[in-house]
Structures are given as structure tokens and as C-alpha cells.
Amino acid sequence: MKAGDVSSKLFNNKYLHYSNPDHPLASDIFILPGARLITDDPKLLAEYANRRFTSVIVLTNYINTMSEAQAEAKNLIQLIKKEYHLK
């Protein structure tokens, strides 16, 4: 089961409010007062937390790898410009 699958068992979307309902992906999302979980099953909550934690680690590693690759690409461009006398 993926984190999204677990979240659909925990969170009720009726408590979400979008600042721009016509464009939800470009909206700020607010949680309405009185929001409740669908279930308070401790095992399901722990599974969700574990999956989110793992997602953060994977995304952090990805961002770090992309940052390093970008720096190496910039260095390579400078080397090519220097070696081939380009501007």
C-alpha cells in the first residue's frame, strides 16, 4: 500500500478548501474547522507517518543529487568554453 492509499483511509477531503476551486493545483489549501480523521487506528497512523518519512528521505536525496549534478554541469560547461575558446 502506498502513502497515498493510506492517506485516503485517514483523511476526508470534505474538510479541504481551495483558495481557487477552479484551479485546485494552483490554489492554497486550507483545512476547515472541525476536521476529523476517518479513523484513528494507531497502526494506520504509524504506517502513514512511516511512508511520509520515507518519501521525505527519497525526495531529499533526489534534490541533493540534482543539485550536485547541476554544479557539475556548470563546471563542465566552463571547461568546454575554456578548452574550445568559446564565449
Image (spheres, rainbow, N blue to C red):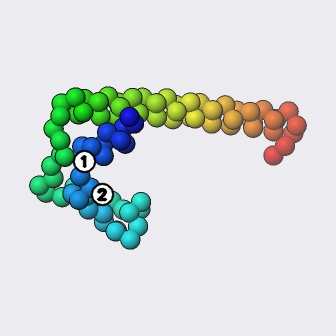
- Please tell me which residue lies in front, 10 or 61: 10
CA neighbours of label 1 inside 10 A, class few (<14), some (14 to 19), many (20+): some
> Identity of the amino acid at label 2?
Ile
Left or right: where does residue 18 sit relative to residue 25? Answer: left
Which corner quadrant of the image does residue 25 belong to? bottom left
Instruction: Tell me the element at label 1.
Output: loop
The residue labelled by disc 2 is 29
Considering every residue shown, the one lying at the far right of the view is 84
Q: Residue at x 36, y 37 (%)?
A: 3
Mark 2 or 1, closer to the camera: 1
Q: Residue at x 56, y 34 (%)?
A: 67
Cα–Cα gap, marks 2 and 1: 14 Å
> Identity of the amino acid at label 1?
Phe
The residue labelled by disc 1 is 11
Dot placed on the residue nearer the N-terminal end, 2 or 1: 1
Which corner quadrant of the image does residue 1 belong to? top left
Left or right: where does residue 67 sit relative to residue 49? Answer: right
Percent coordinates x, y for residue 21 in the rendering: 34, 68
Considering every residue shown, the one lying at the far bottom of the view is 22
CA neighbours of label 2 inside 10 A, class few (<14), some (14 to 19), many (20+): some
